Amino acid sequence: MAGKAEKMGIKNWAEDDRPREKMRAKGPAALSDAELIAILLGSGNRDETAVDLAKRILQSSKNNLNELGRLSVEDLLPFKGVGEAKAISIITALELGKRRRLSEALERQKVTSSSEAFEVLQPLIGDLAHEEFWVVFLNSSNRVRSAKCVSRGGLTGTMADLRMIFKEALMLNAPAVVLAHNHPSGSVKPSSQDKSLTRKIAAAGNIMDIKIIDHLIITEHQYYSFADEGLI
């Protein structure tokens, strides 16, 4: 068995095929997802190289990095060769990637369409396994001042506190907001409760002279815009 492990070790590969050396020579874009994860792992197990182990981990998540990002430490530990430190490294790297995407979206800051609002909010709630309700607070030029979670729920729903939304808007002197919540089911179809809540918040906004620009229902790849559908 030791001979097999030695034969399969990455150190025995051609230098151009080793993930670390390949990254140094060609840059990170030249590496596959499995090779990048293999660098995080550092080593495989007695039967697999780090790259083979990384490929198996990816396959368990349908070769989808967003799916992989949903896994917990406990989900990764059953893979032979993955201890707590390696599991934490993988989760940390994926979380950094998510935050980088959010930072890039916030750099643009101006929200003038549902697609721009989706770009800001999808990294926050698009791949969550539970529902969250977020509010993006805008200034008079529709630039993002702040984005805040105002409610967390379970698999099937969450409720937003109107007082919290408008209290925050008044504190930030935000004349306009964008509402958003996610549907872990993957469906963007609004429920009757979604429609009722949107009408209620919009009516309160009219009274307080705070414009509700839009309400988005967000999933991993899609969104539903109440404004685009003429419901705000």
Image (tube, rainbow, N blue to C red):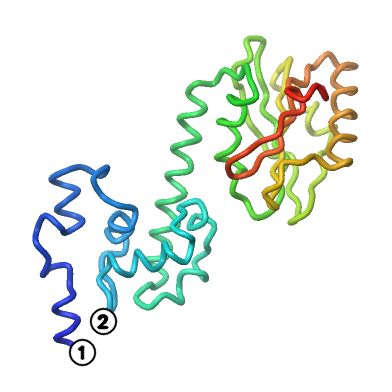
Is residue 45 or residue 62 the one in the foreground?
Answer: 62
Judged from the image, the secondary structure of the residue bearing numbered disc 1 is loop
Position of 161 relative to 3 (above/below): above
Q: Amino acid at mark 2?
A: Arg
Q: Residue 205 location, x and y as percent?
A: 84, 20
Q: Which residue is mark 1?
A: 1
Left or right of 104 on screen, residue 220: right
Q: Is residue 13 left or right of residue 79?
A: left
Near mark 2 (Cα within 10 A), the count class, few <14, some 14-19 or many ≥20, is some
For label 2, the SS is loop
Label 2, label 1: how far apart the Cα atoms are: 7 Å
- Which of disc 1 and disc 2 is earlier in sequence? 1
Q: Which disc is residue 181 wearing? A: none
Q: Return the x and y of residue 197 as percentages of the image width and height.
A: 87, 35
Label 1 Cα crowd, 10 Å radius (few <14 / some 14-19 / many 20+)? few
Residue pictured at 70% horizontal, 31% vertical: 135
Q: Residue at x 46, y 69 (%)?
A: 76
Q: Is residue 140 above or below residue 200?
A: above
Query: Which numbered circle lies on residue 46?
Result: 2
**Residue visible at 77% across and 28% down in the picture:** 226
